[in-house]
């Protein structure tokens, strides 16, 4: 088996500045291989986006403490200097943000932004950069692509802005694409179009992709493997089919039970997970999910569960994992 393209070990991200550090990410391990799509799944505040931003060192350095190791294509990301980091972002690793209206520069046309990125990373002329921008607009299926190159971000619809964001992210031919909930702010029909486009581009270009989502249906649609995050930790990871057919962590089981299966009868209620996620500035001593878990025992309140392999490639952090297999 080939070496992982992305390898993260013991990643911890804490935000400083308040009365207590906010531990947004707590000991995350993950691996991503070339051509693979890996989904980070969890509710808001679980640490998904912070993990993604840590891979590109986008979290504010003065107020953030990052520990652990991040290696991408053999490079130690934590050791890169400013100049190396500029080349690393865009060429090795690139990102599609959740809100393209905030990520794109409002005072430059879309064509100018892509052309500049290409010129900086590849040392080509602005004309060559614009030519690449046109090719990418055609590839992401933006109508009237030549005319749209001269459009400003606010002149495009939400779906077209996200397509332009994808074009910008791909402009320097990255090996790894990070997608931070790229369909959240879009209409349902447009969401499907963007998901299909990303899946098609991933296959055509052989990209490795880390896809952040709170929607388990989206994760199943786009990913080869899923990592379920809760309170800054990966509580379960494995192949999509294994996670869906045989969920082994109580939180994963709860997420799957909370989905609608087919049409609901009038008055029927979706099953929910009781309670709320813990305060990241004051995490409980044991398993962070224990206060909400219907299967918790006294030991869960004091002992932090270690990763346990339940099947080939499926790893779970739960003290009762063997007992819950038949649930």
Image (cartoon, grey):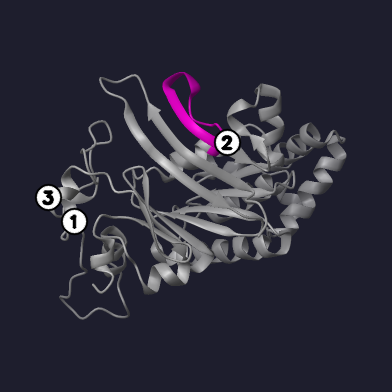
Secondary structure category for the residue under label 1: loop
Q: N-terminal of the two: label 2 or label 1?
A: 2
Q: Residue at x 28, y 55 (%)?
A: 318
From the image, tell me which residue sits under label 2.
56
Which contiguous range is marked in magenta? 55-69
Residue 123, which numbered label? none
Left or right, 88 with respect to 14, comes to right
- Which residue occupies 18% across, 79% down? 266
Graded by Cα atoms within 10 Å as few (under 14), some (14 to 19) or many (20 or more), the crowding at tag 2 reads: many
* In-image side of 105 versus 132 (left or right): left
Please state which of residues 61 and 323 is positioned toward the viewer in this rendering.
323
Q: CA distance from mark 2 to mark 3?
A: 39 Å
Relative placement, left or right, of 320 versus 240 is left
Instruction: Determine the CA span between mark 3 and mark 1.
Output: 12 Å
Mark 2 or 3, nearer chain start: 2
Image coordinates for residue 28, horizontal then vertical, percent: 43, 43
Instruction: Give the quarter of the image for residue 199.
Output: bottom right
Residue 291: percent from left, percent from top: 16, 49
Please determine whether, in this image, residue 66 is positioned above or below residue 113. above
Q: Tag 1 or tag 3, which sits nearer the N-term?
A: 1
- The residue to which callout 1 is attached is 293
Q: Residue 72: x and y, percent?
A: 63, 41
Marks 2 and 3: CB-CB under 8 Å?
no
Labels 3 and 1 touching (C-beta < 8 A): no
Looking at the image, can residue 250 be seen? yes
The picture places residue 186, in percent across and down from the top left corner, at 47, 56
User: Foreground: 80 or 50?
Assistant: 80
Look at mark 3 in the image and give the residue it sits on. 298
Q: Work out whether residue 65 or residue 211 is closer to the camera in this orientation and state it.
A: 65
The image quadrant where one finds the C terminus is bottom left
């Amino acid at each position: 088996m080939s070496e992982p393209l992305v390898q993260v070990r013991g990643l911890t991200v804490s935000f400083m500045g308040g009365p207590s550090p906010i531990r947004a990410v707590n000991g995350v391990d993950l691996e991503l291989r070339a051509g693979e799509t890996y989904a980070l799944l969890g509710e808001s505040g679980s640490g998904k986006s912070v993990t993604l931003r840590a891979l590109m060192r986008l979290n504010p350095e003065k107020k953030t403490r990052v520990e652990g190791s991040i290696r991408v294509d053999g490079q130690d990301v934590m050791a890169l200097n400013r100049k190396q980091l500029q080349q690393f972002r865009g060429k090795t690793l690139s990102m599609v943000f959740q809100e393209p209206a905030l990520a794109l520069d409002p005072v430059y046309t879309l064509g100018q932004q892509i052309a500049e990125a290409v010129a900086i990373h590849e040392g080509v002329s602005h004309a060559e950069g614009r030519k690449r921008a046109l090719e990418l607009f055609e590839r992401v299926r933006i109508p009237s692509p030549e005319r749209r190159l001269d459009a400003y971000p606010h002149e495009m619809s939400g779906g077209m802005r996200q397509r332009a964001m994808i074009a910008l992210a791909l402009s320097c031919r990255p090996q790894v694409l990070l997608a931070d909930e790229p369909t959240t702010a879009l209409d349902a029909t447009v969401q499907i179009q963007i998901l299909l486009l990303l899946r098609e581009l991933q296959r055509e270009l052989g990209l490795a992709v880390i896809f952040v989502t709170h929607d388990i249906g989206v994760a199943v649609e786009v990913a080869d493997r899923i990592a379920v995050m809760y309170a800054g930790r990966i509580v379960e990871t494995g192949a999509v089919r294994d996670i869906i057919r045989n969920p082994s962590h109580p939180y994963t089981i709860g997420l799957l039970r909370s989905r609608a299966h087919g049409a609901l009868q009038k008055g029927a209620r979706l099953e929910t997970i009781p309670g709320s996620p813990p305060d990241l500035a004051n995490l409980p001593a044991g398993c962070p999910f224990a206060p909400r878990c219907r299967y918790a025992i006294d030991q869960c309140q004091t002992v932090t569960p270690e990763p346990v392999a339940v099947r080939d490639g499926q790893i779970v952090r739960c003290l009762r994992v063997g007992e819950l297999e038949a649930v």
